[in-house]
């Protein structure tokens, strides 16, 4: 089996080669060991039925030519002997076809189950990865690995891995019977497997490199498609159709070149196998003819070996036909393993702590520093306390670190230094689900899933329709929702394209409010609302603010005048702190930003 599975280059980070990849796949296969065991049991009669057929045909020829045959045939007449051999051939054919059908069904079933398991595990793992991974990984790359790579992986098992075992059993059975028939001709045929081993090993390595590169180019192609579809309005507004089509053409051509390389190596191995099969037939004919002329071999045995020459290379021909699927599948395992090897750095503790039942929502940052890139601090030495129930605004220029503070509070990122506490408990000691129920976040650009209004508010939790309607009435959203075509069950198109930005934001308010968080985070939550909608939501906001700690990011300073305290950030550090009027009196950065925003409006 060595020429089927080679030690692949460490270039792609798999020192164990294909064996290691198949071992990883085997962990999934172990779950279906009973079906696999049944499939492997069928290998023995399948291999025997395939290997015995050339012997039976050879015996029929020897019987007709009155050459030496086994004793049980000598006792029969010619017609009786031929009928017996024909019946035995029919039995082997029926046995082979029926067992192949059963085994193919079992293997395909196991292959599809393994594919589904790996797809599920990969999806679960991707959702658990830290945000730093998504910051550096294109969405198109992930989609490619979750779809086409997983499908190719199923092929490597259902069509390739077990198919290799079937072929190996067949080769071994044929080899044993050949040596029992005539050792010299058996050696001639088996000797020709040596160059086949070398050639397959070489072409396998070349195909694998080209296949890996072609899938990388496919990832880039999918990324480009995804970006252009999502940003099609920008493409059209700025007249970038021709330029973006040119970019796509370049990536598409690179992908096409890499696919051409895989086709070349796949075709090369198929052609090589055909040539070696012809050489094997010629070698058997030449050596066997010499033995027949010397009366050292019967014509029937020579005929059997002519068939053996074909049968021995049939598994190799089948391998050539499956070659693309096998190598694509192993490449897919390799690429999927790269994602599964990504560490989940933000995990729940083994014994998570519980927040105090009567906690009020205190937030404490203790010397917190964080960098997206080493040495480039987004926040540095943040040290502040927000008492329970206080309303605090974070203000600063773009890049000051406001959104980073929110991401750290929600534990989407881990701080490099320091710690963050809620009601005296380090958030790293909390279960993530508990933390994110405790902290409700409303973003500037809300994301809606496919479904309806109701499902986008409950997000899979067990809130009743009455609870959803009650929270909508509380937030003054009920009238807006009931005016939609199907009310709360109005379908939401992709990313909420059939709703206005303001309507989507209102739904985002409802999905947070129904969870009754103790801490409310507003990240420019009203920036996308028109004046009328914002007026509607202000009353709802006042209700949401009651008995809650509120942290809000705002660029429009008019929206934060009523907060208790304002933290002014610059380069990731708090440089000013106080109420609206106190900061204006200080004449610092906040006063400067206020003058720039309200210059000429006479606002104080």
Image (spheres, rainbow, N blue to C red):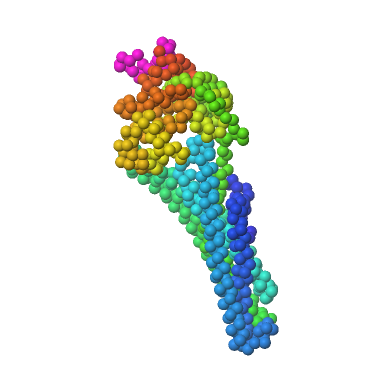
As drawn, 328 above or below 65: above
Magenta residues, as a range?
582-604
Residue 592, given in percent of the width and then of the height, sits at 39, 16
Q: Residue at x 60, y 47 (%)?
A: 14
Q: Residue at x 66, y 73 (%)?
A: 178
**Quadrant of residue 51 in the image?**
bottom right
Q: Is residue 520 visible?
A: yes
Q: Closest to the observer: 318 or 579?
A: 579
Q: Residue at x 44, y 37 (%)?
A: 463
Main SS category, magenta section: helix
Picture quarter with the C terminus: top left
Q: Is residue 591 magenta?
A: yes
Residue 569, given in percent of the width and then of the height, sits at 46, 21
**Quadrant of residue 191 in the image?**
bottom right
Q: Residue at x 30, y 37 (%)?
A: 483
As drawn, 128 above or below 218: above
Residue 186, given in percent of the width and then of the height, sits at 66, 72
């Amino acid at each position: 089996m060595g020429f089927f599975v080679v030690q692949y280059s460490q270039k792609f980070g798999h020192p164990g080669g294909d064996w290691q990849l198949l071992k990883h796949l085997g962990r999934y296969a172990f779950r279906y060991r009973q079906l696999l065991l049944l499939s492997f049991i069928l290998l023995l009669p399948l291999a025997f039925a395939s290997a015995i057929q050339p012997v039976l045909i050879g015996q029929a020829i020897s019987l007709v030519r009155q050459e030496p045959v086994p004793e049980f045939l000598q006792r029969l007449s010619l017609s009786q002997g031929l009928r017996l051999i024909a019946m035995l051939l029919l039995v082997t054919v029926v046995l082979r076809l029926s067992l192949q059908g059963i085994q193919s069904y079992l293997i395909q079933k196991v292959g599809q189950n393994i594919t589904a398991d790996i797809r599920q595990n990969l999806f679960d793992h991707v959702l658990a990865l830290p945000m730093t991974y998504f910051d550096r990984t294109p969405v198109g790359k992930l989609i490619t690995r979750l779809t086409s790579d997983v499908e190719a992986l199923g092929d490597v098992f259902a069509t390739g891995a077990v198919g290799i075992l079937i072929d190996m059993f067949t080769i071994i059975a044929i080899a044993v019977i050949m040596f029992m028939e005539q050792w010299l001709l058996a050696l001639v045929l088996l000797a020709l497997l040596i160059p086949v081993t070398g050639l397959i090993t070489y072409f396998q390595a070349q195909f694998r490199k080209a296949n890996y590169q072609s899938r990388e180019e496919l990832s880039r192609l999918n990324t480009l498609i995804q970006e252009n579809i999502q940003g099609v309005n920008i493409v059209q507004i700025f007249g970038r159709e021709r330029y973006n089509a040119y970019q796509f053409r370049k990536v598409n051509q690179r992908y096409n070149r890499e696919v051409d390389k895989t086709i070349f190596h796949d075709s090369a191995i198929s052609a090589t196998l055909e040539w070696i099969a012809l050489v094997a037939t010629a070698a058997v004919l030449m050596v066997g003819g010499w033995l027949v002329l010397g009366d050292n071999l019967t014509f029937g045995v020579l005929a059997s070996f002519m068939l053996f020459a074909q049968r021995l290379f049939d598994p190799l021909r089948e391998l050539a036909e499956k070659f693309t699927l096998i190598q694509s599948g192993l490449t897919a395992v390799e690429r999927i393993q790269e994602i599964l090897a990504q560490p989940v750095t933000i995990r729940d503790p083994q014994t998570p702590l519980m927040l105090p039942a009567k906690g009020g929502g205190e937030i404490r940052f203790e010397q917190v520093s964080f960098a997206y890139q080493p040495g480039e601090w987004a926040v540095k030495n943040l040290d502040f306390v927000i008492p329970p129930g206080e309303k605090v605004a974070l203000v600063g220029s773009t890049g000051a670190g406001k959104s980073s503070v929110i991401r750290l509070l929600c534990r989407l990122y881990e701080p490099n230094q320091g710690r963050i506490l809620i009601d005296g408990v380090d958030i790293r000691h909390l279960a993530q689900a508990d933390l994110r129920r405790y902290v409700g976040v409303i973003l500037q650009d809300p994301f809606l899933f496919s479904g309806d209004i109701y499902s986008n508010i409950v997000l899979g939790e067990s809130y009743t329709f009455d609870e959803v309607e009650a929270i909508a009435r509380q937030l003054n959203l009920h009238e807006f929702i009931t005016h939609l075509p199907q009310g709360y069950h109005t379908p939401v198109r992709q990313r909420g394209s059939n709703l206005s930005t303001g309507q989507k934001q209102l739904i985002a308010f409802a999905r947070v409010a129904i969870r009754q968080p103790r801490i409310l985070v507003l990240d420019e939550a009203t920036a996308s609302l028109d004046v009328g909608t914002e007026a509607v939501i202000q009353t709802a906001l006042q209700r949401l603010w009651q008995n809650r700690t509120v942290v809000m990011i705002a660029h429009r300073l008019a929206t934060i005048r009523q907060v208790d305290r304002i933290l002014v950030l610059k380069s990731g550090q708090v440089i000013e702190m106080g109420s609206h009027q106190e900061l204006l009196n200080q004449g610092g950065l906040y006063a400067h930003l206020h003058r720039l925003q309200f210059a000429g409006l006479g606002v104080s």
